[in-house]
Amino acid sequence: MRRTLVFGAVLSAVLSAAPAMAWWDGGHMQIAAVAYSKLSPQARAKADALIKLNPDYASWVAGVSDDKKAQYAFVHAAVWADDIKDPAHGYTKDDDTPTGQNIGYADKNMHRYWHFKDVRFSTDGTQFVDADPINAVSQIKLFVAALPTSSGASDDLRSYDMVWLLHLIGDIHQPLHATERMSAINPDGDRGGNEVNVMPATGETIDLHGYWDRMFGGYVSVPGAIFDANDKGGISKLQVDSVKAKILDPDVWTHESFVLGKKFAYEEPVLSENTVAVLTRTYETDARNIARTQAALAAARLANVLNDAFK
């Protein structure tokens, strides 16, 4: 159903004011739901125990039956890294002073720059330097290394790291969390498409990054996300390349996302449009297919990371 222009204007205003988030709640929780179903019994038990240490755990399982608490907490935990961007959580915006620290739940910084690694490219020869070395990839490596019991890290730290990983592995599989276009129009970069406006078939104007982020829906419930992931058209039904799923190097993941971002997120009409790119049916079909494939792959890799760490 075509949305009204009033709705489109409101949505556009909300999106322009919001910080970048990959996949929004719906996508992150669906990825977590599928990953949870792929965990070994041993990995699942260890993941369940660590998630209970998160300060929001009690609210995640409030009113949930005992047989579903573990699954619901795991799925909800996948959006905690975005939840703490809400001022009500009391976390500090530290974007101007990026840090790659790993100190557990004592860390009260939002670390919004941990959610992406902008691999840059230029469409017109505009010169650029590499993005900040503290990013999603640097943190994924740090967190994965701390997960095994043999790392000697405290359970508090391992819980913190695992909850971040539930989110960041989803993030880095969103092509625009690994791609940034440099041009004369945006010489400092377009912030992964946040500075690019597009108009999809729904009729509203939205930034390119937000268009890709919302591919699996916005603020949905945990049971809703689980249902969507396992519905007949859900990402759990997609066939994932077993060889690719076993690749656990976040540098490889990032390169894959960059290639997809450059080829599909910035394909025409986005590539040449300087105001509002009216998306074609081909563009939107490609975007949906890429998003679904990437989300399913992220779920498989997330499960493999945890199975390997908790074996």
Image (cartoon, rainbow, N blue to C red):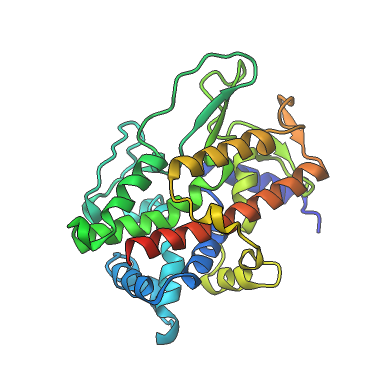
Place of residue 73 in the rendered image (x, y in percent of width and height, measured from the top left): 41, 71
Q: Nearer the viewer, residue 40 or 166?
A: 40
Is 282 situated above or below 76?
above
**Which residue is most to the front?**
243
Place of residue 92 in the rendered image (x, y in percent of width and height, measured from the top left): 31, 44
Whether residue 65 is visible to the viewer of this picture, yes or no, is: no
**Which residue is most to the bottom?**
66
Q: Nearer the viewer, residue 258 or 29?
A: 258
Left or right? Give the position of 212 relative to 204: left
Place of residue 119 in the rendered image (x, y in percent of width and height, measured from the top left): 50, 31
Place of residue 25 in the rendered image (x, y in percent of width and height, measured from the top left): 53, 59
Quadrant in the picture for the C terminus: bottom left
Q: Quadrant of residue 60?
A: bottom left
Which residue is painted at 60% across and 44% down in the image? 210
Is 286 situated above or below 30?
above
Which residue is painted at 66% across and 38% down in the image? 265
